[in-house]
Amino acid sequence: MDTTGNSALTQIFDIVHFTNPSFFLLVYYSHYFTEYLENLKNMEVVRRKCEGCESESSLQCPTCKQLGILDSFFCSQACFKKNWKNHKIIHALAKGSGNEPKTDAFYSYPYTYTGNLRAYPQTPKRTVPLHIQRPDYADHPQGIPLSEQAAKGSGYIKVLDDEEIEGVRVAGRLGREVLDEAARVCDVGVTTDEIDRIVHEACIERECYPSPLNYLKFPASCCTSVNEVICHGIPDTRPLENGDICNVDITVYHRGFHGDLNETLFVGEVADNVKNLVKVTHECLQKAIDIVKPGEKYREIGNIIQKHAQYHGFSVVKSYCGHGIHRLFHTAPNVPHYANNRAVGVMKAGHCFTIEPMISQGTWKDVMWPDNWTAVTADGMWSAQFEQTLLVNETGCEILTKRREKNGQPHFMDKM
């Protein structure tokens, strides 16, 4: 935008440029429609130059007047409307000297949070070197996985051949290595954006494409879900705090195959009731893995998980499920984690899929943040999750993403 001749806006943009470069991300989410309509009704008559076109003006913005901004005028309601997107920056800065946009990416969006966590600004999407093999959605302008769409609806559960089994084994092992790198740095004061950077670089070092990146336009290389976030949290610039829990969800794409896993990690000293939530969530996953074998119905997994979660007073999120995985990121079978589901299919040797229960302290219901990715508990209580990629064999299953040290125990157990 050209701000020549407009001293007020020039000063504001200078402030934004030097003190808060991530502020423009916030402007993208800003929708002051209610405030805008109210301002149109209440603009007061005075004589000054218009902020938008510098012609003689007779309308003063009432919000600016209330905030003590005395040199803000427009020639007409049409000009006010045309310049509203940029003008509202002045309101945000005046209300909090720029503090709110730095700490809440939805500051100017009419959204009511369910819990204490707030969205922080994000950094630009990271890039992957061209020599690394990538899935079909990586360069699609809308991030659409065309290969998944072609297979969707058939319900066919692929039986992997020997070459494909080796492909998912390698992808699972590399995914585990990347998650271990993330777990190593997850601590008080570290931002989830920094975790995302480390994940991204760890993927590149292993000749992997980070599968979440640009999948349906997801803007990061992993998901980081903190406290009341159930899943699909977008890494941002909020520093992790003592007592938080942070789930890091990793998927890598290596030489045509995906490997998917996640763990919930402790940040500093975590309350006992939260430790119990995380412990029970992992137990739910383990109990479900124990029944995986040829001939078992996929719908039985949810019965096992919900029984254990409810016994401990927790609920099972119903909106998200496990899934088949191999050359496709998400495919058949669907694997619900709640009881009395209608999942279709019977396990066979060569099937490859994830189990990834999301267990909450309160309600099982979820709501979505305005970013259309971050799912949070409807009551603001905390949620935990664990995930493994499994390959069904003749006698049971192989956990492709199992930790290679400490007898496979998850990282949170290192701090119990």
Image (cartoon, rainbow, N blue to C red):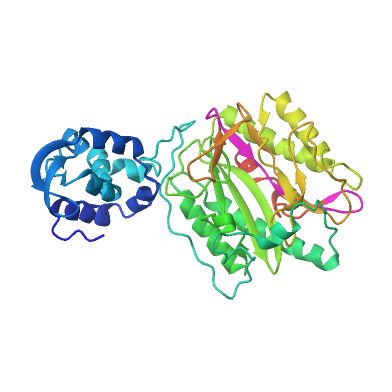
Residue at the spot 32% in from the left edge and 40% down from the top edge: 100
Residue 143 position within the rendered picture, expressed as x and y whole percent measured from the top left: 58, 60
Examine the rendered structure and indicate whether residue 403 appears above or below residue 136.
above
User: Which image quarter is the C terminus in?
Assistant: top right
The answer to if 379 sits in the magenta stretch is yes
Residue 293 position within the rendered picture, expressed as x and y whole percent measured from the top left: 88, 46
Residue at the spot 43% in from the left edge and 52% down from the top edge: 122
Magenta stretch in the rendered image: 378-397
Q: Is residue 182 visible?
A: yes
Examine the rendered structure and indicate whether residue 276 appears above or below residue 246.
above
* Residue sitting nearer the eye, 416 or 363: 363
User: Which image quarter is the N terminus in?
Assistant: bottom left
Q: In the displayed orientation, state which residue is furthest to the bottom.
A: 131
Examine the rendered structure and indicate whether residue 216 appears above or below residue 322.
below
Residue at the spot 24% in from the left edge and 41% down from the top edge: 91
Residue 268 position within the rendered picture, expressed as x and y whole percent measured from the top left: 50, 39
* Residue sitting nearer the eye, 245 or 78: 78
* Residue sitting nearer the eye, 66 or 96: 66
* Residue sitting nearer the eye, 294 or 311: 294
Occupied quadrant, residue 311: top right
Residue 14 position within the rendered picture, expressed as x and y whole percent measured from the top left: 21, 56
The answer to if 226 sits in the magenta stretch is no
Q: How many marks?
A: 0
Q: Is residue 355 visible?
A: no
